[in-house]
Image (cartoon, rainbow, N blue to C red):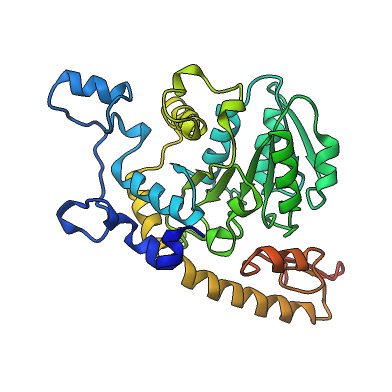
Amino acid sequence: MSDLHRKRGFTTAILHSDRDAAVEHGALHKPLHLSVAYGYRDARELAAVFQGRAQGYAYGRQGNPTTAALEEKINRMEDGVATACFGTGMAAIGAIMLALLREGDHIVSSAFLFGNTNSMFATLATQGLGVAFVDATDARAVEVALTPATRLVFVETIANPRTQIADLERIGELCAARGLIYVVDNTMTSPYLFRPKAVGASLVVNALTKYIGGHGNALGGAITDTGRFDWTRFSNIYDSYKTAKPALWGITQMRKKGLRDWGGTLSAEQAHHLAAGAETLALRMERACANATALAEFLAVQPKVRAVYYPGLPSHPQHALARALFSGFGALLTFELDPNLDCFEF
Ligand SMILES: *Cc1c(COP(=O)(O)O)cnc(C)c1O
């Protein structure tokens, strides 16, 4: 944990993050900034902002102050170097793939993935990217799939929906040894239960739509750069994004491509909903984990239930790993009914 978190605690740090910077009129929440364009004193100042030589906002597609406040909150949660927010979790994952990889590059992905992520990677495989899907509960399967063209490894913490848990620590060691970008989708654990930076993740994905927003009233996604990856050793960074310090090269390219060029922008209103939701993440996660545990234990002893998949059950294949790495088992569970029963009737 960073000093900030140790000093303040998880929730307090999130609650106060808006107020650590100057907030307009003393507002307790970052206000909604809906303006698409921004005015400057003269054209010289405007040009400096557009060219990235001065701080400021240029055009709403590339960000706004309300979204920037949310980015700061997520960055604190993940103890990152920088965070960029997107309109959905999928837009965040898409920005990583499209901004950082080029034709002929290769990725190794867990075979146990959120269905839409799996579909995205399968599409990229038809567009000049090599993709290997492997059983990421075993780091050796990742290692065997690496090729000289491999640039990136992608896993989920607790896979949605079957709850397989990737061999997170050992894949982190492998990526560090081979100089690979290690992307961890932390959606199903959330930064309250787990910080992927601890296992060497280069980039952390959070679908803010899920636990962080928490109320089902806003879509959003985030990429956090943990600072673990050395971007000076990555040949796919365009020269124009090498003006900032090297720690920011990757996030700058993902922001420029994902927001400016591809338009996967999070609106200020959605960012505001997500930021308000984020304040109660700790409270909600504890209750959600407790509810899921009770439900999993109930289902596990029902004669008409054939199998329950929940990392909190001792019968789960990665139960010990989940216990060692996460401060809770999450709230995702799946189960199989007796095959003679009709699931719709159930
Ligand atoms: C939901 C989800 C996503 C995608 O997030 P959206 O905001 O719905 O686009 C990505 N990864 C995981 C693990 C998810 O559960």
Q: Could you say which is closer to the camera, residue 141 or residue 38?
A: 141
Q: Is residue 234 left or right of residue 6?
A: right
Q: Could you say which is closer to the camera, residue 154 or residue 345?
A: 154
Looking at the picture, how far across and down is residue 58, in whole percent? 28, 29
Say if residue 78 shows up in the picture: yes
Looking at the picture, how far across and down is residue 304, in whole percent? 82, 77
Q: Residue at x 24, y 31 (%)?
A: 37
Looking at the picture, how far across and down is residue 345, in whole percent? 73, 70
Q: Is residue 311 above or below residue 2?
A: below
Q: Residue at x 77, y 45 (%)?
A: 111
Residue furthest toward the left?
41
Question: Split into 4 quadrants, where in the image is the C terminus?
Answer: bottom right
Say if residue 258 shows up in the picture: no
Q: Is residue 344 above or below residue 298?
A: above
Q: Quadrant of residue 133?
A: top right
Q: Is residue 101 left or right of residue 125?
A: left
Q: Could you say which is closer to the camera, residue 85 or residue 321?
A: 321
Residue furthest toward the front?
3
Looking at the picture, how far across and down is residue 156, in whole percent? 67, 50
